[in-house]
Amino acid sequence: MSDKRGLTGQAYEPIPDGGRYEPYIGADQSPLEFTAKAVVPGIVFGIIFGAANAYLGLQAGLTISTSIPVAVMTVAAFRAMRGIGVRGTLLEANMSQTIGSASSSVASGVIFTLPALFMWGFDPALTQMIMLAMFGGLLGVLFMIPLRRFLIEREHGKLPYPEGTACAEVLVASEEGGAKARNVFVGLGIGAAFKFVFGWLKPFPGTVSFPVPFVAKAQLGIKMSSALFGVGYILGPKIGAVMVGGGLLSSLVIIPWINAWGSGRLEPFYPETVELISEMSPGEIWHRYVRYIGAGAVATAGIITLIRSIPTMIESFRIGAGQLRARVGESGVSVRRTERDMPLRMVGIGVAIIFAGMALVPHVFGSIETVALRATAAICVVVFSFFFVTVASRIVGLVGVTSNPTSGMTIASLLGTSTAFALAGWTDETGMAAALTVGCVVAIAASISGDTSQDLKTGFLLGATPHRQQVGELIGVLTSATFVCLTLLLLDKAYGFGSEELPAPQATLMKLVIEGVLRSELPWGLVGIGAGIAIVAEVVRIPSLPFAVGVYLPVSTMVPVFLGGMLRWVLDRGGRTNEQKSERREKGVLLGSGLVGGEGLFGVVIAGVVFYLSVTSPAGEKPVLPMTVGMNWGSPLVTELAGAAAFGVLVWVFARRCVGSVAGE
């Protein structure tokens, strides 16, 4: 093990021509790395955070990177095992986070797309969903492998890979001492307890809302979610403020405007065919009209993000393709341990097997019986995946995983595939399902390539063996795909997608895109208004994608995100030194990650209990969770105030723990 303290300045600066980066653990050392005690915790933690991220994404339309939480939890597990004589190395901890973090990217691609199949009335088999998740994840990892030497090694110091660098810093700091992992576990406990109270016992309402005086049908509210609060802290004040700004535009401007405009109409306004606008509640106006405006805003913002990335995309693709050609002839060359990639021959064989599987295995893309049509869909997958993996791997190096325009890439893939299907006359339900499944595989591939890039950057800084990390990524995909898809099935059985509990916003958006191209059923006027909102946001230099997500989701979902971001702003300003600010921020990020994991996991537990009760209860009887006390506070106002007070306690505890990290606990 290295005796150095922390990463050197070389970790952040370009390497001079002819020079070489010397990692934290040198290439001449061979510490344990790919072992059972590294692989097993990675798989377990990956399953935990994969399920939690799936629940979060279906609730709020976003997921978080889990590399750092998995890393510190692994370090904690290794320390706990010291009592029985088992010790873990730094590279084993890195391997564990490499395997564990893959699940979040798989979950992102799955929840962005597959719930649309359920909303269309299809009943996809578990095996089909698992194959789609595995194919997408494997393609993303395999296509990234030839790019590693250029993007990670030769562009070192030019592409910062922020999450990968931060994870390396956390692992080195944990190796050298500290109790960082405690924050994740505390967050897990608080998040689970919060969900138990609001999701199981239910003494308080899950959402507190109230009308805005003097503005008809304007309404504000807050969803009692510890996970969304944690996400807000992780994202920071700027993104939190932008997202809640979009939500306020919907609730305080668009809904009252639609109500005022439609109050004199004596007939329903499309796409509604029965109820008058004047008879609708604010929530019904949002559901019938505002979500289409939000969908147009999100789709346009995603495409704008993609267009702005075109120069980077073209350059990345050109360089990546050149690197691939240059490496095709490599064989039998002796390389250092820290530069050893998976052989390109194995990459090519893996891609060929995946293509054959998609083209030959029935029902991968739905009820497509013709091999030629399945092969066409498989070609679309491979082409779009190769292009967007090359693009995403470089983009996340510049701006990080959270800014990876996966939505825009998925929309572009769906538009391209749907247009091809429409020209071929393949516009029935089978064509819609096939187009969506193509988008699913591409979304997962683009998402996992960003995670793989960050993990390989972490390994590069620490001195890991790339070949072993790449195998670890593949293991992470294969082991998490089944559990993410099982979580999806369980949540659908318990709540249904598109419900208040699980609105599945991204999947709803993808559904609308496909229907718009293949069925021409969209209310294009509303979509156009949303597109205009995204364009105006860009013109006035507001980040259009988070703003559009705020327009698309109920404002009550955005408020806890905003509060989490504002708490981070307050704590940063309250720090006396940069070190103190950094320590508070780091502890808050780990604590927030724990909140996401705790609420998400307990949400899945509740879904499992609801599903069991629905199966065992008499037909037609709605299952009731045992010990549910209900809201028996006498007055609705008192009940809502009590719920708000409980959320205030969460904020206070969170802030106290962040400040305590500096003052000493």
Image (cartoon, rainbow, N blue to C red):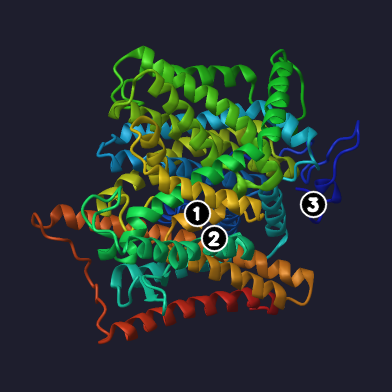
Q: Which image quarter: residue 569?
A: bottom right
In the drawing, what numbered circle is on residue 7? Answer: 3
N-terminal of the two: label 1 or label 2? 2
- Above or below, 530 relative to 622: above
Of residue 512 and residue 207, the one placed in the foreground of this image is: 512
Q: Nearer the viewer, mark 1 or mark 3?
A: 1
In the drawing, what numbered circle is on residue 549? Answer: 1
Give the amino acid at mark 2: Met
Of residue 84 and residue 265, the one placed in the foreground of this image is: 265
Q: Residue at x 44, y 43 (%)?
A: 112
Circle 1/circle 2 CB separation < 8 Å: yes
Residue 337 makes an appearance in the image:
no
Q: Name the spot of residue 591 as percent of width and height, x first.
A: 56, 66
N-terminal of the two: label 2 or label 3? 3
Q: As drawn, is 502 to the left or to the right of 65? A: left
N-terminal of the two: label 1 or label 3? 3
User: Distance from label 1 to label 2 (Cα)?
Assistant: 7 Å
SS of the residue under disc 1: helix
Q: As drawn, is 359 to the left or to the right of 337? A: left
Q: Residue at x 71, y 75 (%)?
A: 573
- Above or below, 156 relative to 556: above
Q: Residue at x 77, y 34 (%)?
A: 153
